[in-house]
Amino acid sequence: MVVVVGLALTAACGAGSAGTVTAGAGSSAPAAAAPTTATPPGPSVTVTPSTATSVAPATQTASRTPSASPSRTTSAPARRTTRWNEPTTFLALPVVRGRALAGMVVVLDPGHQIGNSRHLAKVNRLVNAGNGIRKACNTTGTQTNGGYPESKIAMRIALAAKKRLEAQGAKVVLTRPREDVALWGPCIDARGRVGNGVDADAVVSIHADGAPATARGFHVIRPASVKGWTDDIAKPSKRLAIAVHDALVDAGQRPATYIGSHDGYDVRSDLGTLNWSDQPIVMIELGNMRSARDAAMLTDPTWQDGVAAAAITAGVVDFLG
Ligand SMILES: [Zn+2]
């Protein structure tokens, strides 16, 4: 059990509308593997992190095909679940160099900041979240049952994606410079405006969720069309959402069925980060940190770079290409 004293932790990721809860809440979930209906990892695709980066992406889905069995008459979703990454089977995609993003500006917003918990008065201050809503400047984010913070995952993936996007010629701007216990914020409204100041071609906000332990998978949140706020970016943001969503699926990631449209998408009109953007923007919840199996992937450095960052990059390239 994780016991955190003196911290306010969000029950869910900061994208959630719930307020903060006191320390320890939500940290008593058992660490045992979450029950799942998914089939076990396929034996033919086990790859250790040390060799993962040398594996060509094209081999990934092909080798993931389940062996023929008498149950092949089952429905399509049952077959599809066999393709999803599991902690011991994911393949890391190599860095691709090219000029697909030459001249493009991409903003990456690593959610939260590790120092937020030390500056709660500032972080809890209400700000204009757009669309007539006031919300806390920021939150501490969520964490795994083992205490790995969301902000750290978000930053590691953002830095890895920055390298990959730069390898494709993009200029990449981060909304916060580093994971630093001495720093806090920025607030959600400021995060949402970063892309406006640099005329970003795409903005990706990176988070991981804090849902019930049995929930799994990623979801991509795009802004609803709100007159005067996001009506100008709703359509391109939807295209960006589809591009990133599909890149994550292609990388073997499981769309969340516990939230939104139950297929890895959600649409929100209450998120300051999305509402303040004048550029195409999505927020990704890359998995559920309270699921032991999702957490095992989310905290794996090879997955962070070779799957998450690689898929974000592929999605942005698809959107801007
Ligand atoms: Zn978050």
Image (spheres, helix red, strand yellow):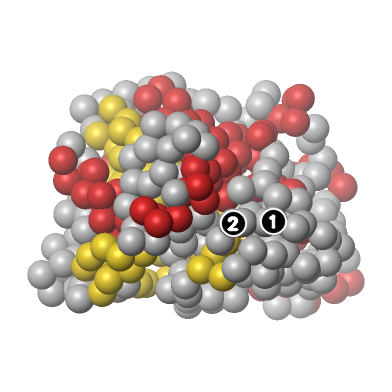
| Residue 41 image offset from top left, x and y in percent | 82, 54
**Which amino acid type corresponds to the residue marked 1 in the rendered image?**
Val
Q: Is residue 315 visible?
A: no
Q: Residues within 10 Å of mark 1 (few under 14, many from 20)?
A: some
Q: Find residue 292 and report its horizontal and vertical position in percent.
A: 77, 58
Nearest the viewer among 206 and 235 is 206
* Above/below status of 307 relative to 247: above
Residue corresponding to mark 2: 7
Residue 225 against residue 158 in the figure, above or below: below
Q: Badge 2, how many Cα within 10 Å: few under 14, some, many 20+?
A: some
Pick whichever, 226 or 121, lies toward us.
121
> Which image quarter: residue 201?
top left
Task: Tell me: 244 left or right of 40.
Answer: left
Q: Residue at x 32, y 52 (%)?
A: 187
Residue type beneath disc 2: Leu
Q: What is the secondary structure assignment of the residue under circle 2?
A: loop
| Quarter of the rendering containing residue 233 | bottom left
Q: Is residue 51 above or below residue 121?
A: above
Near-viewer residue (210 or 281): 210
Residue 308 percent coordinates (x, y) = 55, 43
Residue that badge 1 annotates:
4
Relative placement, left or right, of 190 versus 14 is left
Q: Tags 1 and 2 in contact by the CB under 8 Å rule?
A: yes
Left or right: 128 with respect to 2? left
User: What's the residue at 39%, 61% (across, down)?
Assistant: 124
The answer to whether mark 2 is within 8 Å of ligand 1 is: no
